[in-house]
Image (cartoon, grey):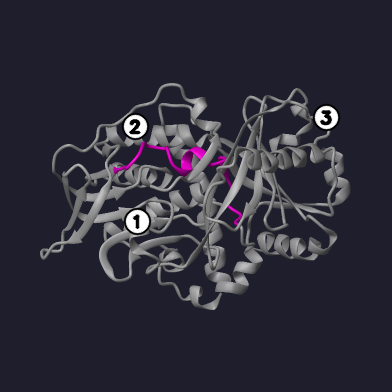
């Protein structure tokens, strides 16, 4: 198992007690086997359990122990690829449908959060998306027009508007309404717990070492400990392409990113309405607050697949992130308490991969490439539930693994 992150993580320290699950010790027979106990796996498990579909989660490590722990908890309907650019890429109808699905997913996460027994830190927020330079202002205005024309709740702020609300100014910004924040670690644990109470079987420390389709069409999974799982359907909810496929399925870029969390800031009231803040530059810098007044920030993406293991080299990068925070908020002086580096993936067309394997019936993938992993996980939970139940989903053709848009980028 490759390391997905390195450093001192913030979210696991916000939940002192959480449920653990046994290793699979005996053979089981289910309708759906979900490989992976992170955000995607937990969301899929919850959606299936809510609909009375017998399923299990098989996690080789611990629930929420992978990319979930390094997630910075921003829920946005806007994506790494602007709506205006996505329209150019896949057409207006599909691009707008995808963006609306992302917005709906944020709302669905909020609805689920309200149903859980645990406070998962879901709070509705707005985002400030600013032009990093004057040269990027025309594209930002084009994006604002596309969002506004298609019914999204947005505002455009001039430099004067920005400086009237913040201790910094930029060439211009879009304010998007309808975003949210969450504690991803608490959310995944609460989802798994709630789903298990609805009948979902959850097994940690259960590594799948073999997967074949039997002559009768059923899926046969073998665990490292010798237990067997028989299932009608298998969902690989593991974040990125399974190593076992050796690049046969998807060609995507795996990179690494950095993030920090500070101690509570005494001047946090200078952060207007606790907007998420991000920029048009690529790779982009972004930051958010927490309910107790901390700042979480991230960026400095690098085109290498492994998390950085050199501690001093990591500090040099995370110190730069803290400097960026102080560029925006000069009075902030609370020290860093957590810093980490993590792996993330990007597809060639900036969309996730969600759907059935083109050459392996009843095998599905939820591979959340891109910066909106939690939102994509929620979309996947409904989309894959529909496909398994024999129903359509409006954006299934847009995110399927063999979509034509991959050939155009």
Span colored in magenta: 58-79
- Residue at numbered disc 2: 193
Q: Is residue 316 above or below residue 143?
A: above
What residue occupies the far right of the structure in this picture? 160
Q: Which tag, 1 or 3, sits closer to the chain's start? A: 3
Query: How far apart are the alpha carbons under marks 2 and 3?
Result: 41 Å
Q: Which tag, 2 or 3, sits closer to the chain's start? A: 2
> Callout 1: helix, strand or loop?
helix
- Across and down, in percent, residue 356 comes to 33, 64
Query: How far apart are the alpha carbons under marks 1 and 3?
Result: 47 Å
Q: Is residue 154 visible?
A: yes
User: What residue appears at the point 28 percent right and 37 percent down from the top-left corner?
Assistant: 202
Q: Is residue 392 visible?
A: no
User: What residue appears at the point 86 percent right and 42 percent down from the top-left corner?
Assistant: 163
- Across and down, in percent, residue 68 comes to 47, 41
> Callout 2: helix, strand or loop?
helix
- Residue at numbered disc 1: 384
Q: Is residue 70 above or below residue 13?
A: below
Q: Are marks 1 and 3 in contact (CB under 8 Å)?
A: no
Q: Is 36 placed left or right of 113 in the picture? A: left
- Residue at numbered disc 3: 331
Q: Quadrant of the C terminus?
A: bottom right
């Amino acid at each position: 198992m490759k390391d997905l992150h390195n450093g001192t993580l913030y979210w696991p320290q916000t939940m002192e007690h959480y449920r653990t699950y046994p290793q699979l010790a005996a053979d089981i027979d289910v309708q759906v086997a979900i490989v992976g106990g992170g955000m995607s796996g937990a969301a899929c498990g919850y959606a299936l359990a809510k609909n009375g579909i017998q399923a299990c989660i098989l996690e080789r490590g611990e629930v929420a122990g992978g990319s979930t722990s390094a997630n910075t908890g921003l829920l946005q309907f806007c994506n790494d690829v602007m709506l205006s650019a996505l329209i150019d890429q896949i057409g207006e109808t599909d691009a707008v449908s995808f963006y609306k699905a992302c917005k709906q997913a944020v709302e669905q996460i909020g609805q689920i959060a309200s149903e859980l027994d645990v406070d998962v830190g879901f709070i509705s927020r707005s985002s400030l998306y600013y032009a990093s330079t004057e040269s990027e202002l025309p594209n930002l205005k084009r994006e604002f027009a596309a969002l506004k024309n298609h019914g999204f709740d947005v505002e455009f702020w001039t430099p004067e508007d920005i400086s009237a609300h913040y201790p910094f100014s930029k060439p211009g910004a879009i304010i998007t309404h309808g975003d949210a924040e969450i504690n991803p670690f608490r959310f995944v644990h609460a989802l798994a717990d709630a789903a298990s109470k609805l009948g979902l079987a959850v097994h940690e420390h259960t590594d799948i070492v073999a997967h074949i389709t039997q002559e009768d069409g059923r899926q046969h999974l073998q665990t490292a400990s010798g237990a067997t799982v028989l299932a009608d359907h298998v969902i690989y909810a593991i974040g990125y392409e399974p190593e076992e496929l050796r690049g046969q399925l998807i060609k995507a870029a795996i990179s690494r990113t950095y993030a920090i969390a500070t101690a509570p800031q005494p001047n946090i009231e200078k952060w207007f309405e606790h907007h998420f803040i991000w920029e048009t530059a690529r790779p982009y810098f972004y930051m958010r607050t927490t309910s107790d007044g901390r700042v979480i920030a991230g960026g400095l993406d690098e085109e290498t697949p492994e998390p950085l293991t050199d501690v001093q080299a990591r500090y040099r990068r995370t110190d730069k992130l803290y400097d960026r925070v102080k560029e925006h908020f000069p009075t902030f002086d609370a020290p860093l308490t957590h810093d980490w580096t993590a792996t993330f993936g990007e597809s060639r067309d900036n969309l996730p991969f969600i759907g059935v394997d083109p050459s392996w019936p009843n095998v599905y993938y939820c591979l959340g490439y891109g910066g909106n992993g939690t939102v994509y996980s929620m979309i996947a939970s409904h989309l894959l539930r529909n496909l398994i139940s024999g129903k359509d989903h409006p954006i299934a053709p847009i995110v399927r693994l063999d979509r034509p848009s991959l050939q155009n980028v």
